[in-house]
Image (tube, rainbow, N blue to C red):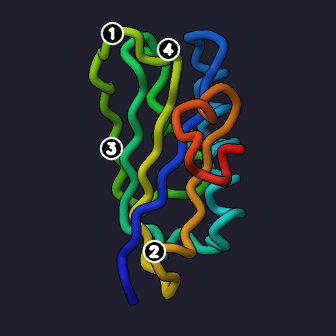
């Protein structure tokens, strides 16, 4: 079984805890659905990043609320690139899977779809 990375991103309208946690749950739910992840035992680890303008909550709190209590989770801040998209939460899940690299579905939601126009799930 291989370890694969699954990427996703979602934008939020404002820097508030409820919105950050809700958007993170939405993105995690969609990443799991799109990649048939039904058991968090298959998740090796997860890295969450936020743009520097999102400071009201740790996105990992949402993952814990969904049941990722044994998964190592890490939150970090994205690089403050000039003209970068504001208010974005990104996730990189490392998962054990039989799927090949081309079978992985990366998920981009809301305005974050513009980050990866080359990814079909962002359409």
Quadrant assignment for the N terminus: bottom left
Nearer to us of marks 4 and 3 is 4
Q: Secondary structure at mark 2?
A: helix
Alpha-carbon distance for marks 4 and 3? 20 Å
Please name the residue that numbered disc 4 is placed on: 86
Residue situated in front as seen by the camera: 17 or 85? 85
Quick one: label 1 or label 2, which is nearer the N terminus? 1
Q: Secondary structure at mark 3?
A: strand
Q: Residues within 10 Å of mark 2 (few under 14, many from 20)?
A: few
Alpha-carbon distance for marks 1 and 3? 24 Å
Q: Is residue 21 above or below residue 94?
A: above
Nearer to us of marks 4 and 2 is 2
Residue situated in front as seen by the camera: 91 or 19? 91
Alpha-carbon distance for marks 1 and 2? 32 Å
Residue found at x 54% / y 38%:
9
Quick one: label 1 or label 3, which is nearer the N terminus? 3
Do the numbered discs 4 and 3 sit on residues whose CB atoms are within 8 Å? no
In the drawing, does residue 77 fall left or right of residue 16? left
Quick one: label 4 or label 3, which is nearer the N terminus? 3
């Amino acid at each position: 079984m291989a370890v694969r990375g699954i990427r996703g991103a979602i934008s939020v309208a404002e820097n508030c805890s409820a919105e950050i946690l809700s958007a993170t749950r939405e993105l995690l739910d969609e990443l799991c659905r799109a990649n048939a992840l039904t058991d968090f035992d298959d998740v090796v680890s997860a890295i969450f990043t936020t743009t520097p303008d999102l400071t009201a909550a740790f996105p990992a709190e949402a993952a814990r609320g969904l049941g990722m209590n044994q998964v190592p989770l890490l939150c970090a801040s994205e690089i403050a690139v000039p003209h970068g998209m504001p208010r974005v939460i990104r996730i990189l899940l490392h998962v054990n899977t039989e799927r090949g690299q081309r079978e992985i579905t990366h998920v981009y939601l809301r305005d974050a779809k513009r980050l990866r126009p080359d990814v079909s799930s962002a359409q």
